[in-house]
């Protein structure tokens, strides 16, 4: 695009450049900006400075202030030959400055140089945008694979014990809400960032994956277990942990998104006072992911009907859990549960089991 208020100059530049390029002309700064707003997309603007109305400097300021034309290269063609004139033009963002009367070879060379530079810049910009989009696409793909992997693994346990109904959906949401409540707590703020909470939500369904290894006569027994049977049932924690570890070994690498899943599978039956299983961990030795799951899992077990027990009310479940503060549960985690217990009640209602 050539912008000049003198018809002779427009004719001269059109003749000089027309055999090599498609040339658009504008006889004023206002006209040039209007053409750009109407959809013209030149690769380069040759811009006169001394024009009536809006001068070239103001045109360039407006070009640089508009996102669509911010990177459009501009060469000033001007009879203003003082050093400060050129300095101002370059300071405003001009790519080059040619004084009149022009030299045809110089104009052609400078134009060619700026078009080559713009082509390179456009290529790099387009490549960067493509790479950014590709990274985003592959990230979504990886996350989808993670979700499918967890869903497939958790479904195996669910098919063995279909009595638990929507237990997985509820515990996922309990854990996430509890983690959100603890985000501002000084003991947990460093670990419970948004990314980690997303991993917790994905990992929560795997807490009982080890039940796939428990014999049917124990897992599906319509009554309380004998001490011997309970010892076998307790092994679902190590079975679940080891199954995830074996899957990682088969891939030849540890997967960060499965780290909370391994912690939850192995440690969600540990108790704050060290009386849990399978390792009798106590206090902060129990991973925070497992401490959160312990609260979620126990609450849901208490309010849910089983063949060997009736469902408790929310109030009865909360009373039992309150009594377990500092024994079964991390005191701060239990306090967070008590603060948001109505959210747990709402989640349970939204994902209630139906006969």
Image (spheres, grey):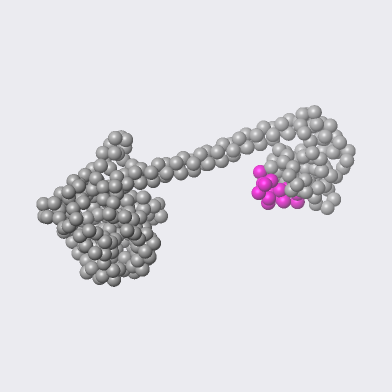
Of all residues, the one furthest to the front in this rendering is: 355
Q: Which residues are magenta?
A: 55-71
Q: Quadrant of residue 169?
A: bottom left
* Residue 62 on the magenta span: yes
Q: Is residue 289 above or below residue 313?
A: above
Of all residues, the one furthest to the right in this rendering is: 8
User: So how many labels did they put on this image?
Assistant: 0
Left or right: where does residue 212 sit relative to residue 65?
A: left
Foreground residue, 4 or 151? 151
Q: Is residue 171 above or below residue 247?
A: below
Q: Is residue 207 above or below residue 311?
A: above
Residue 85 in the image: state x and y as whole percent: 76, 46
Left or right: where does residue 165 sit relative to residue 124?
A: left
At horizontal 69% and vertical 35% (from top left) the residue drawn is: 114
At horizontal 66% and vertical 36% (from top left) the residue drawn is: 118
Q: Main secondary structure of the magenta part?
A: helix
At horizontal 29% and vertical 49% (from top left) the residue drawn is: 158
Can you see residue 77?
no
Residue 94 in the image: state x and y as whole percent: 70, 43
At horizontal 71% and vertical 31% (from top left) the residue drawn is: 112
Foreground residue, 126 or 333? 333
Can you see residue 252?
yes
Foreground residue, 92 or 228? 228
* Residue 323 on the magenta span: no
């Amino acid at each position: 695009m050539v912008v000049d208020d003198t018809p002779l100059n427009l004719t001269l530049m059109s003749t000089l450049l027309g055999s090599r390029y498609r040339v658009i002309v504008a006889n004023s700064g206002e006209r040039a900006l209007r053409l750009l707003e109407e959809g013209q997309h030149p690769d380069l603007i040759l811009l006169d400075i001394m024009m009536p109305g809006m001068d070239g400097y103001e045109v360039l300021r407006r070009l640089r202030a508009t996102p669509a034309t911010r990177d459009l290269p501009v060469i000033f063609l001007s009879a203003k030959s003082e050093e400060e004139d050129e300095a101002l033009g370059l300071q405003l963002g001009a790519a080059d400055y040619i004084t009149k009367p022009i030299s045809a070879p110089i104009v052609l060379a400078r134009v060619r140089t700026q078009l080559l530079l713009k082509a390179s810049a456009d290529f790099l910009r387009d490549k960067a945008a493509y790479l950014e989009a590709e990274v985003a696409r592959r990230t979504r793909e990886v996350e989808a694979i993670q979700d499918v992997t967890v869903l497939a693994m958790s479904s195996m346990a669910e098919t063995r014990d279909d009595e638990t109904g929507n237990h997985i959906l509820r515990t996922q949401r309990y854990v996430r809400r509890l983690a959100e409540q603890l985000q501002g707590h000084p003991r947990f703020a460093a670990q419970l960032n948004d990314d980690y909470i997303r991993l917790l939500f994905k990992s929560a369904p795997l807490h009982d994956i080890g039940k796939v290894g428990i014999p049917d006569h124990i897992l599906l027994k319509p009554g309380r277990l004998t001490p011997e049977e309970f010892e076998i049932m307790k092994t679902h924690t190590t079975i679940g942990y080891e199954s995830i570890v074996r899957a990682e070994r088969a891939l030849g690498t540890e997967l960060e998104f499965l780290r909370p899943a391994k912690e939850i599978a192995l440690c969600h039956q540990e108790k704050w006072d060290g009386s849990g299983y399978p390792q009798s961990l106590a206090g902060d030795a129990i991973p925070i992911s497992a401490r959160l799951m312990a609260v979620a899992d126990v609450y849901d077990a208490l309010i849910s009907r089983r063949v060997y027990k009736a469902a408790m009310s929310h109030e009865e479940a909360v009373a039992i859990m309150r009594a377990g503060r500092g024994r079964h549960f991390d005191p701060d985690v239990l306090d967070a549960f008590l603060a948001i217990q109505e959210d747990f009640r709402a989640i349970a209602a939204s994902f209630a089991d139906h006969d």
